[in-house]
Image: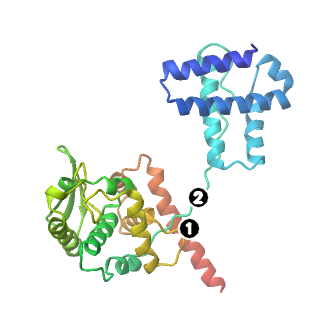
Amino acid sequence: MNIWNQWLSDFRIYLENVLNSPENTIIAYTRDCVQFIDFIEKYYPCVYKTGDISEVEAKAFKDKLEEKGYKKITCARKLDSLRKFGEFLKNGGLRKGVNPFYRIPYPKPERDRIDYLTIKEIDILLSMDFRNDFIGLRDNALLELFYRTGFRLSELANLKRHEVKLKDGLILICKKKDEIRKFPGGPKTFEAVTKYLEARKKKIPSSRIKSRNNTFFLNNSGYTITPRSIARIVSKYLKEVAERQKLSTHSLRSSFTTHLLDAGLTIKRVQSILRHKDCMITYKYKWYKKNYENKKSNKNKSN
């Protein structure tokens, strides 16, 4: 067993027994390390024999990934794996010197397109002529809550009946006794939700509800409506409002976020409402809107 195989074997044991990393993480880290080792063996045979890697080889590997057309987010993930590998070798005393990957900068991620609806499009969406039956009233309430809360698809699909309360112009989502999320509502939202609940009670009495956890939104048979079904419902209505192909359920969350920022709420406040782990996730909405409008403005001037 050569030195690289020994290091890799020890690294796997460290990930599994010390860090208690999930199996998928261990597989991914190992695969990234093997790719780097193969690169060293091919392009730096002397370094491969000694194991004395430096920032030169680390940067060359990053450049090779970019040359092969790897996405920037993939390059960043591979560098993260190797940074942990280098830190393990350094802290374990298996090799001397600094972590060769420590000062290699991560590639800046691509700016993904954010598809959101304008205020006018949202008004059209929520003012559509919904059917006056259980399905129509449910779809109306679903779209209202989707936009007014900025929930993810999974959050909305798993919403329970007892968790939703309407009080003093607010939508209250009570997940736990000590956790109440508050969202601004309005007469139309309250009316849509109230009418749906009345239709729900009339159409499907509690004795007939087949949803194990009594979820808020049900299908016509009284079962929990699946995320895939919700996505189909939302897509159907979005197509009637806007012709953009990439609009999806997440477009409602993006619209909610963008409109909050446009209304003057701080990045920190919106981050708290949306439950973003990193404020940079929230900031990208502001960045995209600003740059999108600048490009649109410049395009109009040139025409």
Provide the residue designation for mark 1: 291
Name the residue beneath numbered marker 2: 111
Q: Farthest residue to the bottom: give it.
A: 303
Report if residue 257 is visible in the image.
Answer: no
Point 18% across, 58% down: residue: 208
Tag 1: amino acid: Asn
Dividing the picture into quadrants, the one containing residue 168 is: bottom left
Q: Quadrant of residue 57?
A: top right
Does residue 83 appear to the left or right of 227 in the view shown? right
| Residue nearest the observer in this picture, 43 or 259 | 43
Q: Kindly check if marks 1 and 2 are in contact, taking CB atoms under 8 A apart as contact.
A: yes
Image x and y of residue 274, in percent: 36, 55
Dividing the image into 4 quarters, which one contains the N terminus?
top right
The amino acid pointed to by label 2 is Arg
- Give SS at disc 1: helix
Q: Name which of mark 1 and mark 2 comes first in the sequence.
A: 2
Q: Nearer the viewer, residue 83 or 13?
A: 13
Q: Looking at this view, is 267 or 227 the one in front?
A: 227
User: Can you say whether 106 is above or below 245 in the image?
Assistant: above
